[in-house]
Structures are given as structure tokens and as C-alpha cells.
Image (cartoon, helix red, strand yellow):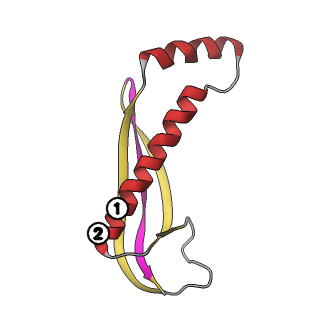
Amino acid sequence: MIITTSGSIAGKNIVQTLGLVRGNTIRARHLGRDIVAGLKNLVGGEIEEYTKMLAEAREQAIDRMTDSANEMGANAIVDVRFTTSYVMGMASEILAYGTAVVVK
């Protein structure tokens, strides 16, 4: 599966547009991570626990979007974007979406 943020793929022709595909996940913060994050906030620096959590959430959203595209018969996804939204005090949604296409 080719996944790209652009509307085209160099060297390939889009022969069929199948439609919107998306994948999402909702992740909640963890109390233990919040304590570590609070300490990091005092001294500064990257909060690796949250970096890892968000990277895993993005990968899961991509995997779900790719599964959706495969079910439609696509071999590529173009115009891929990410968005996040606040769900509640300690949880956020990560959404990956794009256009499923067939390329040759």
C-alpha cells in the first residue's frame, strides 16, 4: 500500500478513485505518565512517554485507514492528513484520513 500526503504519486497513474478512507483511535492519558510529565514540566525537556503514546496512536490510525482502503480494493491512499480532537479531560482522538485510489 502506497500512502502519501500528496495528491499524486510520481511514476504512477491514478486509474480509479474509490473514496474517503479513515482510521481513528482514542487514547487516554495514564496517571503514571502524568506524574512523570509533571516532573518533566518542572525541569523542561521532551516528555518521551507522551511522544511514544502519540506515535503509537498515529500508527494505529494509519493501520485502520489502510485496512479500510484494502477492503475497498485500493492499492494506494493519497492526500493523507491527520487531525486530533479533544474527547474529554484525559482523552483525545487521532484521525488519519485520505482518498483511496487504484494506481498503475
Q: Residue 67 carries which label?
A: 1
Label 1: few (<14), some (14–19) or many (≥20) C-alpha neighbours in 10 Å = some
Q: Position of residue 75 (x, y in %)?
A: 42, 75
Segment tinted magenta in the rendering: 89-102
Mark 1–mark 2 Cα distance, whole angstroms, equals: 6 Å
Residue underneath mark 2: 71
Question: Does residue 99 appear to the left or right of 55 in the view shown?
Answer: left
Which residue: 43% across, 15% down?
A: 31
Which residue: 56% across, 77% down?
A: 8
Magenta residue check for 94: yes
Picture quarter containing residue 6?
Answer: bottom right
Residue 47 sits above or below residue 103 on the image: above
Q: Is mark 2 on a helix, strand or loop?
A: helix
Of 26 and 59, nearer the camera is 59
Helix, strand or loop for the magenta stretch, by majority:
strand
At label 2, which amino acid type do we have?
Glu
Picture quarter containing residue 65?
Answer: bottom left
